Image (tube, helix red, strand yellow):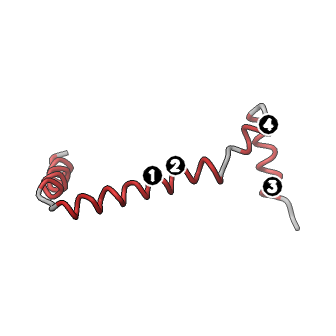
Amino acid sequence: MNLLKKVFHFYIDGFRNMDRLGKKLWIIILLKLFIFFIILRLVFFPNFLNKQFDSKEQKGDYVLDQITKTK
């Protein structure tokens, strides 16, 4: 636990002592990660199983069928 606290303080102190350009770049990086993982997931990867099936058994059967289907 002590090591985790030291690592956390290491990064916090580094961010506090960073110049304005570095802080702006980190904000841009975090914004891009937010867009990649949250916004794009909602737009391009909707929850197909919840829209198509009502019960867990139906979802499981569909996934099993899709995984084991031969071409």
Where residue 35 appears, as percent x and y from the top left, is 49, 54
Determine contact: label 3, label 1, CB under 8 Å: no
Q: Secondary structure at mark 3?
A: helix
- For the residue pair 71 and 47, the one nearer the viewer reads as 47
Q: Which residue is mark 1?
A: 34
Q: Which residue is mark 3?
A: 66
Determine contact: label 2, label 3, CB under 8 Å: no
- For the residue pair 62 and 11, the one nearer the viewer reads as 11
Please report the residue visible at 78 percent of the width from the left and 31 percent of the height from the top. 54
Quadrant (top left/top right/bottom left/bottom right) for the N terminus: top left
Q: Secondary structure at mark 2?
A: helix
Q: Within 10 Å of the Cα at label 3, are there few (<14), some (14-19), or many (20+) other Cα atoms?
A: few
> Which numbered disc, 3 or 4, marks the residue closer to the eye?
4
> Which numbered disc, 2 or 4, marks the residue closer to the eye?
2
Q: Within 10 Å of the Cα at label 4, are there few (<14), some (14-19), or many (20+) other Cα atoms?
A: few
Q: Which residue is mark 4?
A: 53
> Which numbered disc, 2 or 3, marks the residue closer to the eye?
2
Q: Which of disc 4 and disc 1 is earlier in sequence? A: 1
Quadrant (top left/top right/bottom left/bottom right) for the C terminus: bottom right
Determine contact: label 1, label 4, CB under 8 Å: no
Please report the residue visible at 23 percent of the width from the left and 58 percent of the height from the top. 23
Q: CA distance from mark 3 to mark 4?
A: 14 Å
Please report the residue visible at 43 percent of the width from the left and 58 percent of the height from the top. 32
Q: Within 10 Å of the Cα at label 1, are there few (<14), some (14-19), or many (20+) other Cα atoms?
A: few
Q: Which of disc 4 and disc 3 is earlier in sequence? A: 4
Where residue 14 appears, as percent x and y from the top left, is 15, 58
Q: Amino acid at mark 1?
A: Phe
Q: Amino acid at mark 2?
A: Ile
